[in-house]
Amino acid sequence: MLVLLGGGVVANVILAKTKGFGGGTLMINIGWGLAVFAGVIVSYASGAHLNPAVTLGLVASGAQDFGNAAMGTTVAVSVVSVLAYISAQLVGAIIGAVVMWLGYKQHFDAEPDAATKLGVFSTGPAIRSYGWNLVTEIIGTFVLVFVVIGFGRNGDGGGLAALGALPVALLVIGIGASLGGPTGYAINPARDLGPRIAHFFLPIKGKGGSDWSYSWVPVVGPIIGGVLAGVASTALLPILG
């Protein structure tokens, strides 16, 4: 749901001949925020885990279980549960990207620019500088995970499942508006890698390459940022515990 709607708003804004063509960056930011809102709503039983950086950040913050205690769907934090969550996030992102492509198939065919087509699926830097691009992704993801943990500790139950979908959606819109310019703010390894894999294997007319040389940045940066936020939350957010 996250990638279907998030990739969908990018497709609507940048692909040829769409009704939303030229809608601008703010439209994309709002669309991604609402995509997160929808994703959180439908993944409530899992604790609303949509992002490996959030999952790893929660582990780094000392979380003992994942899921939703009220629904009886909690699982203990372990190597197996972490790998299961991250694998599911990646598979879901691939499926979402494929469905998004089906919805915009004719517009992908009509779009002449290969880079624009890839831009619907995955992020890319405005100025390519791997080190600084990495820094941007670390900062953006740190903000996401740190504030999400803050939301959770203010909720009824002290975990990600306790927070509402709307605050997270607004947070994502804010990060996009404030920090999204340099790299397109992946802030989620699955959100970027899954659709990039889909771009690689889908029969997209004139698609060009999948920019694998950059693909590590929106994976490594968010993981670092998420873990740093989790560790920092144990010292900087104790008043919310």
Image: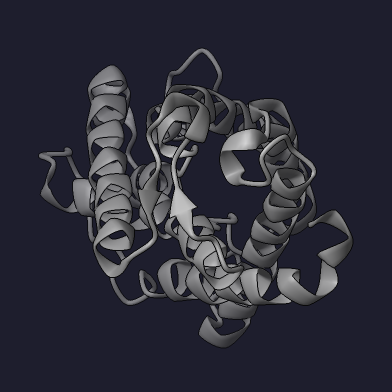
Q: Residue at x 60, y 26 (%)?
A: 34
Relative vertical location of residue 119 with respect to residue 101 in this rendering, above or below:
below
Residue at the far right in the pictured view: 239
Q: Position of residue 154 (x, y in %)?
A: 80, 43
Work out whether residue 154 or residue 187 is closer to the camera in this orientation and state it.
154
In the image, taking residue 54 as reference, residue 236 lies left or right, namely right
Relative vertical location of residue 21 with respect to residue 226 in this rendering, above or below:
above
In the image, taking residue 239 as reference, residue 84 lies left or right, namely left
Asked where in the image residue 52 lies, by quadrant, the reply is: bottom left
Work out whether residue 120 or residue 134 is closer to the camera in this orientation and state it.
134
Q: Residue at x 57, y 37 (%)?
A: 161
Residue at the far top in the pictured view: 19
Q: Residue at x 44, y 25 (%)?
A: 71
Work out whether residue 151 or residue 212 is closer to the camera in this orientation and state it.
151
In the image, taking residue 2 as reference, residue 37 lies left or right, namely right
Q: Residue at x 23, y 48 (%)?
A: 199
Q: Position of residue 77 (x, y in %)?
A: 39, 60
Residue 18 appearing in the image = yes
The C terminus: image quadrant: bottom right
Residue 123 appearing in the image = no
Tally of numbered tags: 0
Work out whether residue 34 or residue 115 is closer to the camera in this orientation and state it.
34
In the image, taking residue 132 as reference, residue 87 lies left or right, namely left
Residue at the far bottom in the pictured view: 131
The N terminus: image quadrant: top left
Asked where in the image residue 27 lies, by quadrant, the reply is: top right
Q: Position of residue 143 (x, y in %)?
A: 73, 60
Colouring method of the image: one colour
